[in-house]
Image (tube, rainbow, N blue to C red):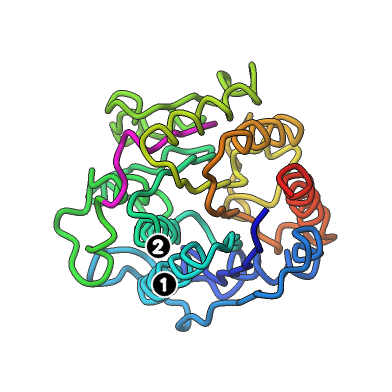
Amino acid sequence: MPEVELIGVPFDGYGRPGNQALAAGALRRAGLAAALGSPARDTLLELPEPVAERGPAGGLLNEPALVSATDQLAERVAAAVAAGRFPVVHGGDCAPLLGSVAGLRTAAGTAGLVFVDGHEDAVPLDVSEDGEAANTEIGLLLGLTGRLLTGPLARRRGVLDPAALAVLGPRDRDWRARFAVGSLRDAGVWLRDVDEVAAAPRVAGRDAAAHVAATAPRWWLHVDLDVLDPVVFPAQGLPGVPDDPGGLRWAELTDLLLGALEVPGCAGGSVAIYDPEQDPDGTCARDVVRLAGHLAAAVG
């Protein structure tokens, strides 16, 4: 395995000063660096103060911090991949993928994405109920939404070829139906829902990565931890709001990711959606670090 470069993102998609903004620090304290071989390069991004309001460029919450995180990640990921390092982005939510995928494309010429998530994240901006970018980043990357975007986020739109995307684990059909939002599968995207993944996790992961690598030889592996069942990972979602039932178990997620990593070409990865404030004894953080250790051992 190439040298790992850790990049922490203290970002919260709702503009809260805590919650997901604390994830990168909590994972560090739980031993993430040691689990990944104690990389020499370990950075925590500096972001503007959070703003719990919609911004003028895209109507997205906490927009100044989102723009900053996206721009910094695009630069850092591009530099790491070009230098032969393996960037591991951790903390925040899915929205910083806008920068990571752009950075990989800059360094490699093309970019693929194996996207493991409990949601498809392609809600059009004009029907977003709250302006959280993590509900729409895949739609933006594919260019399915955001045609009226202005400012720095506009250049992140449409940088991902639909053929270079595989989606694994969503269970948000009922939620999408509330907004009359169809499935990415209907748009021709390779997708396996949570039940299809759980039936054969390792095969699903391997097939997803093979599909992506056929179009983009260098690809990114993203894990949104809300793909897990809240019974085994309760530190997801919003405090006081019931999480979507169902989801994968830890063993299933581990097998899925190990299957994906059997396919050559993974250039970096990210893990998101962990709220330390819903994990007072640190159990969930230790579980995430344990998963990272299993993956590092498998590809080391």
Which residue, given by chain and number where applicable, does mark 1 sit on? 75
**Kind of residue sitting beneath label 1:** Glu
Chain part drawn in magenta: 159-169
Picture coordinates of residue 218, whole percent (x, y): 45, 47
Picture coordinates of residue 1, whole percent (x, y): 68, 53
Which residue, given by chain and number where applicable, does mark 2 sit on? 103
The residue located at (33%, 54%) in the rendering is: 109
**Kind of residue sitting beneath label 2:** Gly
Q: Is residue 56 left or right of residue 211?
A: left
Question: Residue 52 falls in which quadrant of the image?
Answer: bottom left
The residue located at (71%, 36%) in the rendering is: 254
Question: Residue 272 falls in which quadrant of the image?
Answer: bottom right
Tell me whether the residue at label 2 lies in contact with that at label 1, contact meaning CB atoms closer than 8 angstroms: yes
Q: Is residue 153 above or below residue 297?
A: below
The residue located at (42%, 38%) in the rendering is: 120
Is residue 265 visible in the rendered image? The answer is yes
Picture coordinates of residue 284, whole percent (x, y): 77, 52
Q: Is residue 188 left or right of residue 221?
A: left
Residue 121 tag number? none
The residue located at (47%, 32%) in the rendering is: 172
Q: Is residue 198 above or below residue 92?
A: above
10 Å crowding of disc 1: few (<14), some (14-19), many (20+): some
Is residue 132 visible in the rendered image? The answer is no
- Assign a secondary structure to mark 2: helix
* Count of labels in the image: 2
Picture coordinates of residue 189, whole percent (x, y): 34, 29
Q: Is residue 125 above or below residue 96?
A: above
Marks 2/1: CA–CA distance? 6 Å
